[in-house]
Image (cartoon, helix red, strand yellow):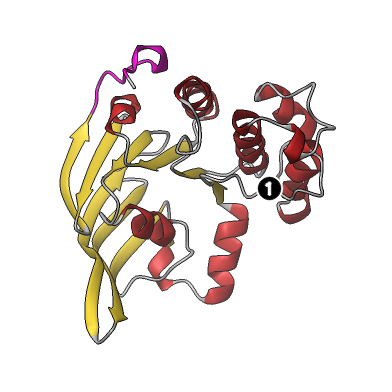
């Protein structure tokens, strides 16, 4: 069994009297320590899959396991603990607290996770040693995204989920963020899942999962992931 397993997972929504199959019998596996890219156009079901994996939404049917935990069987309290302790989240628009400095944003992880890493050390690792005292409004988009990554990493999560992490960035800054994510995956052995509509990012992954209309179209094992600097945006 893989570290992450989706087995016939469905997520249905009822809107205007009709049923929308946001995830339609989705099945795939992801191995521990992999960088996985989930690729698809808007409406393909990427965010639904990420929300189900991160415990932010519940499946209508099917089974999701992460390690020895059955996410689909968890109570609301267990899901809260799972999100708090096991999963780090990186969002497209950073979701930083604007009245806190960069370091204080990262230190939030210490308040919720007993095994958190040292915030200052993590800030140094993401290249922001000289920006710890700055507020988000004083940082570039790329720097804010690195603060977001540092906050997620500080939790010391087994699983890092990234929702369009380069979607709000220019290509050069996006490359820097992707380089950081691939390095974290390599150095920390963290399982990293990136969802994106940008097909150029796909070759970075050890595994590429293509979604369309809520269904898995293809799963590709990439034995030779491309280097970030070789990506053609």
Say whether residue 228 is left or right of residue 203. Answer: right
Residue 132 % position (x, y): 80, 30
Instruction: Name the residue at 42% across, 34% down.
Output: 33
**Which percent across, then down, holds residue 117?**
72, 37
Q: Quadrant of the C terminus?
A: top left
Horizontal arrangement in the rendering, residue 34 relative to residue 7 (left or right): right
Q: Nearer the viewer, residue 166 or 105?
A: 166
Q: Note whether residue 112 is visible.
A: yes
Residue 227 part of the magenta segment: yes
> In the drawing, does residue 18 fall left or right of residue 141?
left
Q: Nearer the viewer, residue 117 or 14?
A: 14
In the rendered structure, does residue 43 fall within the stretch colored magenta?
A: no
Query: What predominant SS class does the magenta segment belong to?
Result: loop
Depth order, front residue of 191/174: 174
Label 1, secondary structure: give it: loop
Q: Residues within 10 Å of mark 1 (few under 14, many from 20)?
A: some
- Residue at the far left in the pictured view: 217
Q: To which quarter of the image does residue 64 belong? A: bottom left
| Residue sitting farthest toward the bottom | 17
Q: Which residues are magenta?
A: 222-232
Residue in the picture at 30% in, 80% down: 15
Residue 201 location in percent, x, y? 34, 29
Residue drawn at the location 22% of the way across and 59% of the way down: 214
The spot of residue 86 in percent (x, y) is: 56, 51
- Name which quarter of the figure residue 14 lies in: bottom left
Relative depth, front residue between 132 and 16: 16
Does 45 sit above or below residue 132? below
Report the number of numbered marks: 1
Residue 118 visible here: no
Residue pointed to by mark 1: 96
Q: Residue at x 52, y 43 (%)?
A: 158
């Amino acid at each position: 069994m893989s570290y992450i397993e989706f087995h016939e997972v469905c997520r249905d929504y009822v809107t205007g009297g009709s049923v929308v199959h946001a995830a339609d019998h989705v099945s795939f596996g992801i191995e521990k320590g992999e960088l996985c890219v989930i690729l698809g156009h808007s409406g393909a079901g990427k965010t639904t899959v990420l929300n189900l994996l991160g415990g932010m939404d519940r499946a209508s049917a099917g089974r999701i396991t992460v390690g020895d935990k059955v996410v689909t069987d968890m109570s609301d309290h267990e899901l809260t603990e799972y999100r708090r302790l096991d999963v780090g989240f990186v969002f497209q628009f950073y979701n930083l607290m604007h009245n806190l400095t960069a370091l204080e944003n990262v230190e939030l992880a210490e308040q919720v996770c007993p095994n958190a890493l040292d915030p200052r050390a993590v800030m140094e690792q993401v290249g922001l040693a000289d920006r710890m005292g700055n507020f988000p409004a004083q940082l570039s988009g790329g720097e804010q995204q690195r603060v977001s990554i540092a906050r997620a990493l500080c939790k010391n999560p087994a699983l890092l989920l990234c929702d369009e992490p380069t979607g709000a960035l220019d290509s050069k800054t996006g490359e820097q963020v992707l380089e950081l994510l691939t390095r974290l995956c390599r150095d920390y052995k963290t399982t990293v899942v990136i969802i994106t509509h940008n097909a150029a990012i796909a070759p970075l992954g050890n595994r590429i999962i293509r979604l369309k209309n809520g269904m898995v179209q293809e799963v590709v094992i990439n034995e030779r992931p491309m280097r970030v600097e070789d990506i053609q945006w």
